[in-house]
């Protein structure tokens, strides 16, 4: 049990308090994890007399550092019993903001990847069709046909520098994560990346990319449909570079984007899904269960999607049944998000049962009817569904959620299918041990850097090398090229930053709602700010504080 691990931590803590215990924390005057004594540094249970002198330097000091290293190794091993893994539930809902479902009266949904979850087998179809469009209609080299879709290459949330043909992962502070920049299918050396951006890893996104991540110079790939687009873009660039063919980066990027768009506009993707819904649509019965449960509890539902009515109708009939429209108070198709949320000029049009446009003016939105396009301002005026009593779910942080939260005060829920796989990786013993030891080693590096003699610097360099190796191993657990969609080595990714900013809740699928009561309150964990967490993990567990006592701080104003 986890409690056993905590009791082990307590046993480690007791000797540090000057009490007897099964294990001596250390034979040195400082506890494991404490660095060289400095002004105000004190182990809580230790006498406040002057500490015994530390080794003067050379081999003796180097041995002292490695002793601290081994102490940390043992500590991390004891703190992580096997039961500590699998603590996270892939079917849980995670909160960025406190929200009570009791206060939510109206639920809204996107369709693609929200109500309808699609199998990954759809991505190779999109890739192959767009590749063939490039060859047959845009007259790209026949050699591109040798490339097949690689589902393990890219992850969602990456940025693409159009002028440099560079696909890369950027963190929340606009820095490129070194080791995650690719031109074509080949990694770009870190030194070249830094040189390309004027001697820095920092990307001035405010100059190069708009609010929705669409350029003009840098594009962010935010939706799940962008995975085959990134793969195709990288394959085409790889072919041109590998064969020494000159090309205009902007033209190539636009052609690939247009080819992917053609797959959607020409209805190819819709045709594949409609022909074999059992193959492509996942969790349809769970979607039905979620919608039925909400209606049974008196909630009002609406649907706003960019997909056409005929496609949505067939999918909803497959998942819910022929009377699916009776579950929704309002249904809007081909909404043209995100401009639906920002442009008040486009009026609603009603569709008849065959999907043909009607010409009458819309003065109210009726249950059971289908509407096309429109805008959020008329939607709010006609429904009076405003503010935090509305909760809208979507998979695209920009097109679905950003404007609703920032401009209109709706509550928002992000559907992140990748979350399920990432949590399963986080729950593995390999990840847990790798990350915990990495944090402990980083704490050692921070505290022991005061030793600057030649032999100590060699020890610190060895630790730095090991830390970098651990970071690369942890990254590769998620994706060999780009790592986790949520983190760089230590910072949140730019994708994570947007996820926290634009969603109150996030989850792997809509079916996660079935695990909670309809009046459940979600409380976000209080994650410490840096100034609220002055201790590293190993210091916290042993009770050793590299901080002054309050009495020592009384003179500070």
Image (cartoon, rainbow, N blue to C red):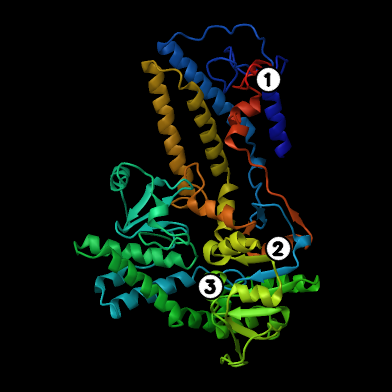
Q: Looking at the image, which residue is at 38% across and 64% down? A: 231
From the viewer's perspective, is 274 left or right of 177?
right
Left or right, 93 with reference to 180: right
**Mark 3 to mark 1 CA distance (whole Å):** 56 Å
Q: Nearer the viewer, residue 161 or 535?
A: 161
Which sits earlier in the primary sequence, circle 2 or circle 1?
Answer: 2
Q: Is residue 335 above or below residue 55?
A: below
Disc sitting over residue 343 in the figure: 3
Circle 1: element type: helix
Q: In this view, does 455 lie above or below 7?
A: above
x 72%, y 15%: residue = 20
C-alpha distance separating marks 2 and 1: 46 Å
Residue 115 % position (x, y) = 62, 72
Residue 481 in view in this figure: no
Answer with mark 3 or mark 1, whichever residue precedes in sequence.
Answer: 3
Q: Quadrant of the C terminus?
A: top right
* 517 sits to left or right of 151: right
* Above or below 340: residue 241: above
Q: Position of residue 72 (x, y in %)?
A: 55, 26
Q: Residue under circle 1?
A: 550
Q: Distance between the residues labelled 2 and 3?
A: 32 Å
201 and 70: which one is in front?
Answer: 201
Residue 14: horizontal and vertical position, in percent? 71, 20
Image spot of residue 384 (x, y percent): 71, 72
Secondary structure of the residue carrying tag 3 is loop
Task: Give the total number of marks visible in the rendering.
Answer: 3
The crowding category of the residue bearing disc 2, from other C-alpha atoms within 10 Å (few below 14, some 14 to 19, many at least 20), is many
Left or right: where 199 falls relative to 120? left
Q: In the rendered image, which quarter is residue 553 located in?
A: top right
Residue 330, quarter of picture: bottom right
- Where does label 2 land, which residue? 513
Give me the residue at 54% from left, 75% from top. Answer: 280
């Amino acid at each position: 049990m986890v409690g056993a691990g905590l009791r082990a931590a307590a046993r480690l803590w007791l000797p540090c308090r000057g009490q007897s215990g099964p294990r001596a924390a250390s034979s040195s005057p400082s506890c494991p994890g404490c660095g060289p004594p400095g002004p105000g540094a004190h182990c809580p249970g230790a006498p406040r007399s002057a500490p015994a002198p530390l080794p003067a330097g050379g081999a003796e000091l180097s041995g002292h550092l490695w002793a601290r290293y081994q102490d940390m190794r043992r500590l991390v091993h004891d703190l992580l019993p096997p039961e500590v893994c699998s603590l996270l539930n892939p079917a849980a809902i995670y909160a960025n903001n406190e929200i009570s479902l009791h206060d939510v009266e109206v639920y809204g949904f996107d369709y693609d990847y929200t109500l309808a979850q699609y199998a990954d087998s759809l991505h190779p179809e999109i890739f192959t069709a767009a590749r063939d469009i490039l060859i047959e209609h845009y007259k790209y080299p026949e050699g591109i046909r040798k490339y097949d879709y690689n589902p393990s290459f890219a992850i969602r949330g990456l940025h693409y520098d159009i002028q440099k043909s560079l696909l890369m992962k950027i963190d929340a502070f606009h820095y490129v994560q070194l080791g995650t920049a690719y031109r074509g299918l080949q990694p770009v050396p870190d030194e070249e990346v830094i040189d390309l951006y004027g001697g820095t890893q920092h990307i001035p996104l405010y100059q190069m990319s708009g609010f929705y991540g669409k350029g003009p110079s840098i594009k962010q790939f935010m939706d799940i449909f962008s995975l085959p687009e990134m793969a195709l873009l990288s394959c085409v660039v790889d072919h041109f570079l590998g064969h020494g063919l000159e090309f205009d980066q902007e033209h190539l990027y636009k052609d690939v984007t247009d080819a992917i768009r053609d797959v959607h506009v020409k209805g190819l993707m819709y045709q594949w899904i409609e022909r074999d819904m059992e193959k492509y649509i996942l969790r349809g019965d769970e979607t039905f269960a979620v919608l039925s449960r909400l209606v049974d509890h008196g909630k009002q539902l609406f649907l706003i999607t960019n997909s056409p009515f005929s496609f949505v109708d067939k999918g909803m009939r497959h998942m819910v049944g022929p009377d699916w429209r009776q579950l929704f108070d309002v249904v809007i198709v081909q909404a043209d998000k995100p401009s639906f949320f920002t442009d008040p000029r486009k009026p609603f049009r009603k569709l008849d049962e065959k999907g043909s446009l009607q010409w009458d003016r819309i003065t109210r939105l009726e249950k059971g009817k289908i509407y096309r396009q429109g805008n959020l301002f008329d939607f709010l005026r006609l429904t009076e569904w405003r503010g935090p009593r509305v909760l809208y779910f979507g998979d695209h942080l920009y097109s679905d959620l950003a404007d609703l939260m920032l401009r209109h005060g709706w509550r928002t829920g992000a559907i992140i299918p990748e979350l399920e796989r990432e949590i399963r990786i986080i729950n593995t013993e390999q990840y847990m041990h790798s990350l915990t030891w990495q944090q402990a080693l980083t704490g050692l590096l921070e505290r022991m850097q005061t030793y600057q003699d030649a032999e100590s610097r060699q020890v610190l360099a060895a630790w730095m090398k090991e830390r970098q190796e651990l970071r690369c191993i942890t990254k590769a657990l998620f994706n060999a090229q780009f790592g986790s969609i949520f983190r760089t080595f230590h910072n949140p990714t730019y994708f994570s930053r947007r996820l926290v900013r634009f969603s109150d809740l996030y989850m792997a699928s809509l079916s996660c709602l079935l695990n909670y009561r309809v009046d459940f309150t979600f409380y976000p964990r209080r994650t410490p700010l840096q100034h609220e967490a002055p201790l590293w993990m190993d210091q916290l567990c042993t009770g050793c504080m590299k901080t002054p006592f309050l009495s020592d701080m009384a003179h500070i104003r």
